[in-house]
Image: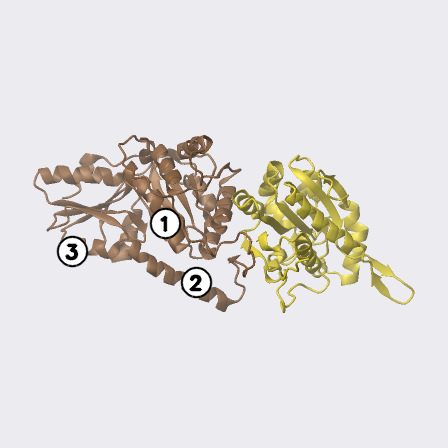
Amino acid sequence: MEVKQLSTFFPNAANTYCPGCEHGLLLKFIGMALEELGVVDRAVMVGSVGCSTLAYKFINVDYVQAPHGRAPSIMQAIKLLEPESVVFAIQGDGDALSIGLQELINAANRGIPVTVFLYNNMVFGMTGGQMAPTTPNGLKTTTTPGGIRYKYLGPPLDACKILSGFDGVKYLKRVIITPRPIYTKDRLMYSSKEAIESYRAVLNALKTQLNGGFSFVEFLGTCNVNWKMTIEESKKYVHEVTAKMFRPGLCRDEFGVEK
Amino acid sequence: MQGAEAIAFAAAESGLEAYFGYPITPSSEIMENLAAIYEKGKYGNFRVFFQTSSEIESINMLFGAGASGHIAMTATSGPGLSLMAEGISYSFLSQVPFLIIDVNRGGPGLGNVEPEQSDLSFVYWSLGHGGTRVIAMSPFTVSEAMTLVKKGFELAFKYRMPAVMLTDGVIVHMYENISWKTSEPLRPEVSWSARGRGNGPRHEINSIYLEPKDLRAVKGDLLKKLEALKKEAAYECYYCDGPLDALYISYGISARIALDAVRDLRRSGIRAGLFRPITIYPFAGEALANVAKMAKKLVTVEMNEGQMAKIIKAETGLEPEGLGYLGGEVPRLEEVMEAWR
């Protein structure tokens, strides 16, 4: 068997994410999946705006930096003109569901085969923890210091619920990327189940694109710094609060890539 | 051929690979003509015709197409151009080429759909945040619109930046005889583009430079590029070979009327001339300053409140008298003729 010399990661790239953030995990899974599928050479990553922007420092594939919320438009244009490319974006919930919702739902409706990885941490992380369309009632943000008032702002926006309405979406899944804290007698440990599931979701989303379908995976993650929590508290919060509001699970797998 | 049809034809002939657009009066006929050309499938290079969900999506699709090294364009009008400013700014710093046809309507706001030249300042000074500049050209005949479409693609790729053709509903909707020489479609050099790195190093189409020194260096390079762009400044001068009683300065459809005025004045013995910038950015300031030395008086004729007069002052220091037409009216011949005094 021929061994490919391609490596998806830049060696020596210093981690610029906050301690406890799962963005790094997501980037690793994407890189691993590109290598497993053997598509590193034809991958194009479209950067969004937010903490997800920083992906360009780590993943060594062709790269286009989009304006805030516009990654789906750029991805579709590249895919239409370069059908052999494997095009994906990592978007945050602020990027994809606030300023970029129009671009996202039009992309979903058209079903042009591209992949969106949504890292949902329920706040605007990069700008310092302002309210996002996904922020739940209990979470105080810098622009909602008194908490969210649903009467004016509505409940948190559910991306999977929105996208499940479009036939163009061929793979739709929500997973928890945050490791679950496990308390043993004498120490705190973290589960590896979430990492395995998240990696599989990345792989299956890219497989769906290779089969000619639009794919979308939402990863429930933390932002302990802006949530004003310890790392441990934030990880508990995802499993105890976030996951009850945004139910994880497979919404659609049209091509049966999960089998 | 009608202007819109001619522009669409010239784009396809020049090697257009993708059109992304959102309907807006008075530009939509360009899009419709390209839809018809695409449907016929005669041009193998023309692989994507796409009606977007907004001008924001149009500009970002242009950005994606340009970033992956493909010849792409859109046609729009003022309100659409405003929405595109964000994407144009990203494209300028990321050095992404494409062509925008701006069919200028009466503005600001919804304004009206009559012809104006009021997008000039917006396009010339900064078509986006952070010091964005774009190549800008303005045709005064249908034939010239066709050559400028091709020129727009060439310059956009040569300098790797957005290009805008400033035109209006008169040029786009009038019928004129055209001449067009069929040639090989353009094949710009795009080894820098992002379409999958293959086995080589990756290509970055990027506009994020978190360190001030990095951004300063990139902006320095862009300024050098703009300096080099100056040699592409194009213009035409009519009756500019001797002393002048008045030198008219006008562009686009206004220049048609100004040229009629100059010819009529010449017939009655008045030494009038016309300087017509073809590229608005870069602006042929040096050439204008040289001709202006021979003229007793300078008069600009334009369909706005005097936007080019301000550009001329910035480019040359000259202060021409301005004849401006607002609200969607073309210049009146008699008034233009009178202005020589």
- Which of the 4 image quarters holds residue B102? top left
Place of residue B235 in the rendered image (x, y in percent of width and height, measured from the top left): 25, 49
CA distance for labels 1 and 2: 23 Å
Q: Quadrant of the C terminus of chain B?
A: top left
Which color was chain A given? yellow
| Colouring scheme applied when the structure was drawn | by chain
Place of residue B174 in the rendered image (x, y in percent of width and height, measured from the top left): 30, 31
SS at mark 3 in the image: loop
CA distance for labels 3 and 1: 33 Å
Give the camera-side residue of B56 and B105.
B56
Q: Amino acid at mark 2?
A: Lys
SS at mark 2 in the image: helix
Chain that is brown in the image? B
Give the camera-side residue of A193 and A62.
A62
Residue, x 82% and y 58% (percent of image)? A191
Q: Amino acid at mark 3?
A: Lys
- Say which residue label 2 marks: B219
- Say which residue label 3 marks: B293
Image vertical order of residue B250 relative to residue B329, above or below: below
Q: Is residue A12 visible?
A: yes
How dense is the environment of label 1, judged by Cα within 10 Å: few (below 14), some, or many (20 and up)? Answer: many
Residue, x 77% and y 44% (percent of image)? A247
Q: Which mark is residue B133?
A: none
* Residue sitting at the far left: B269
**Chain for mark 3?**
B
